Image: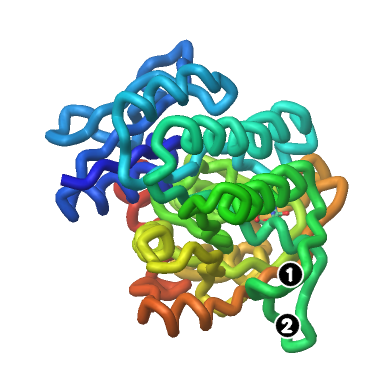
C-alpha cells in the first residue's frame, strides 16, 4: 500500500486529493494546524475513514515535520499548505512569506533528511507569473515570473527552492503550476464562491447587495477535482519536472458574476457595488494558462467546463441556504 503525506489536508485541494488517493488504495497522512475552534480543522475531511491519519503539524515547526516524515516514511509528499489568499498577503506579508516560502524549505529539509527516496510535490501558482503574458496571450512553463503580491513572491521562492533541491540533491521534487481552481469547497472569501454565495442569498431574499473589488481582472478557472488528478500525474512522472495546470479559457470577474446572476434570473448590475477595500495594492490583470505539456505528456483533460463548475457551485449554495 502506497503512503502519501499531505500538508493542508483540510483545504479544498487537500480534501479532494485525500479522497482521490484513498480511492486509489493509498494510506493517507496529513497535518492540520491547531485552531481554537476544533471543527475548523476537519470541516472538509471526514476523519473517521480507514487508512486516513491526521496529526497536528505546522510548516513552521521543522522538528515536528522531521519526526512525522521519519515515522511515516511516505512514498509521496504533497505540500499544499499555505496562506493562500492573495489580498490578505498584503495584510500579513511576513507570515505569508514564512509559511509559503520558508515553510516549503522546512518541509524540503525534513524530506531530504528523513525520506529522500520519496517523491515531493510543491503547490506552485499562476500568481507567480504576475504581469508576464506571452505574445499569444498565454502563460506557460517558460514564461518569466514577475509576481505582483507578497503571496506571489513567496511562491516564487518555494518554486525555485524545489527546483534547486531537485538538482542539488538529486531528489524527485516537482512543481505543479496551478491556475485558479474552484469548487463548492472553496473558501467564500475567494471571488467565485463569494459571488455565488451572495447571489443565492440575494435570490432567497437574505441579502441586498454584493460588494466586490476589481471586476475587470481575468482568471483561468478550473475545478479542484480535475487539478488534484493532475497533481498525482505530475508527481508520478518518470522524470522530475514542472507542469502548468490550466483550462486555457479565461473569463473576467464581471463575466463570471454576470453568468452566476443570470443563472438565477437576476441582473448583476442591480446588486453589485464596488468597495475599494477589496482592491489590491497591485493587481494581476490577466491569467490564461497553456497546459499543452501536461495534456500531451499524461493525456490529461479537465472533466468540468467553466459553466459546469459554476453550476455545481450554484447548486451547492441553493441546497445550503434554505
Ligand atoms: O481573486 C478579483 C481579484 O481571491 C480572483 C488563490 O487560490 O488563485 C487564487 O488567487 C480575482 C482577482 O483569487 C473581489 O482582484 C474582485 O483579480 O478569487 P481570488 P486569486 O487572487 O486569483 C491563485 C492561482 C492562487 O494561487 C491563490 O492561492 O478576483 N476580485 N473582487 C476579488 N477577489 C476577492 N477575493 N474578493 C473580491 O471581492
Q: Which mark is residue 286?
A: 1
Q: Measured from the top left, where is residue 100 in percent x and y?
A: 64, 38
Q: Nearer the viewer, residue 291 or 192?
A: 291
Helix, strand or loop at label 1? It is loop
Q: Residue furthest left?
A: 50
Q: For residue 105, which quarter of the picture?
A: top right
Residue contact between numbered discs 1 and 2, judged by CB atoms under 8 Å: yes
Marks 1 and 2 sit apart, C-alpha to C-alpha, by 9 Å
Q: Which residue is mark 2?
A: 137
Q: Nearer the viewer, residue 163 or 209?
A: 163
Q: Residue furthest right?
A: 281
Q: Residue at x 53, y 53 (%)?
A: 170
For marks 1 and 2, give the one nearer the viewer.
2
Q: Measured from the top left, where is residue 8 in percent x and y?
A: 45, 36
Residue 242 lies left or right of residue 3; in this view the side is right
Q: For residue 75, which quarter of the picture?
A: top left
Q: Residue at x 15, y 50 (%)?
A: 25
For the N terminus, which image quadrant?
A: top left
> Relative to 303, does residue 87 appear above or below in the rendering?
above
> Relative to 25, does residue 41 appear above or below in the rendering?
above
Amino acid at each position: 500500500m502506497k503512503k502519501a503525506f499531505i500538508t493542508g489536508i483540510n483545504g479544498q485541494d487537500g480534501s479532494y486529493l485525500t479522497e482521490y488517493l484513498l480511492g486509489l488504495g493509498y494510506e493517507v497522512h496529513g497535518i492540520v494546524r491547531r485552531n481554537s475552534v476544533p471543527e475548523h480543522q476537519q470541516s472538509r475531511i471526514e476523519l473517521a475513514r480507514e487508512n486516513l491519519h491526521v496529526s497536528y503539524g505546522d510548516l513552521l515547526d521543522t522538528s515536528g515535520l522531521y519526526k512525522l516524515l521519519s515515522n511515516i516514511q511516505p512514498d509521496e509528499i504533497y505540500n499544499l499548505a499555505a496562506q493562500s489568499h492573495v489580498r490578505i498577503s498584503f495584510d500579513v506579508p511576513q507570515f505569508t512569506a514564512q509559511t509559503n516560502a520558508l515553510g516549503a524549505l522546512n518541509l524540503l529539509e525534513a524530506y531530504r533528511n528523513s525520506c529522500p527516496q520519496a517523491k515531493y510535490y510543491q503547490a506552485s501558482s499562476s500568481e507567480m507569473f504576475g504581469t508576464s503574458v506571452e505574445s499569444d496571450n498565454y502563460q506557460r512553463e517558460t514564461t518569466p515570473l514577475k509576481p505582483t503580491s507578497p503571496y506571489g513572491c513567496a511562491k516564487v521562492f518555494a518554486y525555485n527552492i524545489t527546483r534547486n533541491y531537485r538538482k542539488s540533491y538529486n531528489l524527485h521534487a516537482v512543481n505543479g503550476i496551478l491556475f485558479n481552481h474552484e469548487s463548492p469547497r472553496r473558501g467564500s472569501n475567494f471571488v467565485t464562491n463569494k459571488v455565488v454565495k451572495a447571489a443565492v442569498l440575494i435570490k432567497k431574499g437574505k441579502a441586498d447587495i454584493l460588494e466586490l473589488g476589481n471586476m475587470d481582472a481575468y482568471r483561468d478557472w478550473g475545478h479542484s477535482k480535475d487539478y488534484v488528478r493532475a497533481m498525482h500525474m505530475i508527481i508520478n512522472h518518470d522524470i522530475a519536472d514542472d507542469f502548468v495546470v490550466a483550462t486555457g479559457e479565461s473569463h473576467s470577474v464581471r463575466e463570471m458574476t454576470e453568468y452566476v446572476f443570470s443563472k438565477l434570473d437576476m441582473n448583476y448590475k442591480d446588486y453589485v457595488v464596488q468597495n475599494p477595500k477589496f482592491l489590491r495594492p497591485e493587481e494581476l490583470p490577466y491569467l490564461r494558462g497553456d497546459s499543452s505539456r501536461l495534456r500531451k505528456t499524461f493525456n490529461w483533460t479537465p472533466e468540468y467546463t467553466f459553466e459546469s463548475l459554476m453550476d455545481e457551485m450554484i447548486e451547492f449554495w441553493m441546497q445550503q441556504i434554505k
